[in-house]
Amino acid sequence: MDSHKINRRAFVGTLAAGAFAAGLGQRSIFAVGGGGQRRIASFVCDVTPPLGTPIYSSMQPLEVIEHPLLAKGIVLEDSGGRSVLCAIDYCLVRNSLYDLYRKEIAEAAGTSIDRVAVHTVHQHTAPLADSDAQRLLEGAGEPVPGPSVESFEAPAGIMAAAVKEALTDLQPYDSLGTSMAKVERVASNRRVPIGEGKVGFRASSCKDPELIEKPEGLIDPMLKTVTFAFEGKPLVQLHYYATHPQSFYGDPRATYDFVGMARERLEKESGVPQIYFTGCEGDVAAGKYNDASKEAREGLYERLYAAMKSASNSPHYRPAQDAIWRTVPLRLAPRNDESYNEAHCRSLLANVEQPALARISAAMYVAWLERNHRPLDLTLMRLGDLVFVHLPGEPMVEFQLYAQSLLPHDFVAVAALGDGAPAYICPDRVYEEGGYESRASHSAPGADVLFRDAIKKLLVG
């Protein structure tokens, strides 16, 4: 039976407990460890919306599932309790929906929510999930055709079932491996200097010869890999790399795109579960090397796969350590300018004559305003000299480089795209330079200092 089809039926509530177990057929089966050992299990489940569900970024009804959208992660168990890291093949998960996903996963794992990190991979051929914004739209006159609140919330139960099932298959691990590989000709900075302190926009796909010829700009070229192993045998591998992970977008198709293609190929060939996290990619994409053609997509996939394979084959091991977690709250001031302010966005939201995407964007900003009294969470999980940093929103790449610079003697793996509510998190200069990121940010200038201070407190106290 097709496990992906089983999980899609869960969205409409017809999935029984036995079907949940069948739908987790891709998850690695681990023997149960004992004697208080450190233990690990991986999980995977299909969270693709049903056909016909409007999907980002076209907002047309989903017609083709080129690849199933997967939620993949690990459960760790040690003397401090259980920890969960999860990466979802969605564009964004925002506001109370993000809290729901963490809460359901934490309860399933038998742990506290502050030991659960959930991130999206950020493909643009996948849901941009915000149940708060959707409720605002549904209550604002003639509704915008879009995903239902139910379609956004159903994956919480699917992921919780996957995590709970994984607890029966925990396996001892005794060592942690780290490795890196340079990714060739994938990432490039989107913000291309054009003179007089201004920037042009080299997006995820680009056909402008002048922009293509410009240098890559500021990126983090290194893919970082963490291997959990027992007696020298890899059990699961986590990869971290910073770029927008799309080669195309705008049609009614679901796909995990070139990053998922590389991930799943390596898993099939190695027999080891592979999980991919996207770093601080706010101003980084594949535009220098991608013209949206099939050939360009194949090249991105092959080159990322080559780096992942190289890193996965060369772990440097050290003894396993228990997980130590830290959480730092962050509050960012919302924008209040001509484009983003409460009165303007509420007016757009209520105006049924406005284009659907304008109303959706307004609803997301209002949802951010209404949740802004609750801080965002920045979390860190330390395993000896391995540091896993979990950040909200879409930060620009220099925040990742900043985090790494704070702990130069540790292996720092950065995952962004936790709670997507703040959208882009930008250095203050970006608001003067122009470009897409400043226009799409939900936060006012001043976020730069607040975010850096929170990162520093998270990493070094």
Image (cartoon, grey):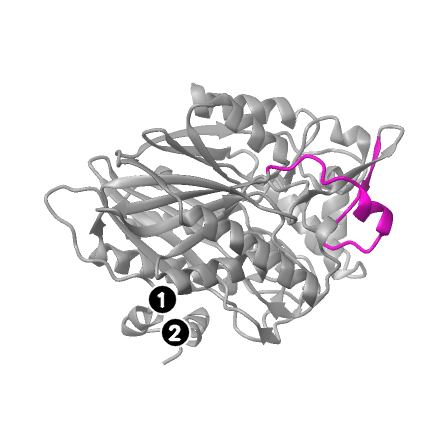
* Mark 2 element type: helix
Q: Is residue 142 visible?
A: no
Q: Is residue 29 visible?
A: yes
Quadrant where the C terminus sits is top left
Q: Quadrant of residue 453?
A: top right
**What residue sits right under mark 2 in the picture?**
3
Residue 454 is situated, as x and y percent measured from the top left of the image, at 52, 24
Q: Is residue 115 above or below residue 348?
A: above
**Do the residues under discs 2 and 1 have CB atoms within 8 angstroms?**
yes
Magenta span contains residue 18:
no
User: Farthest top residue?
Assistant: 461
**What residue sits right under mark 1 in the picture?**
26
Q: Quadrant of residue 136?
A: bottom right
Q: Residue at x 52, y 27 (%)?
A: 403
Q: Which residues are magenta?
A: 198-220
Q: Residue at x 73, y 57 (%)?
A: 357
Q: Amino acid at mark 2?
A: Ser
Which residue is nearer to you in this view: 354 or 177? 177
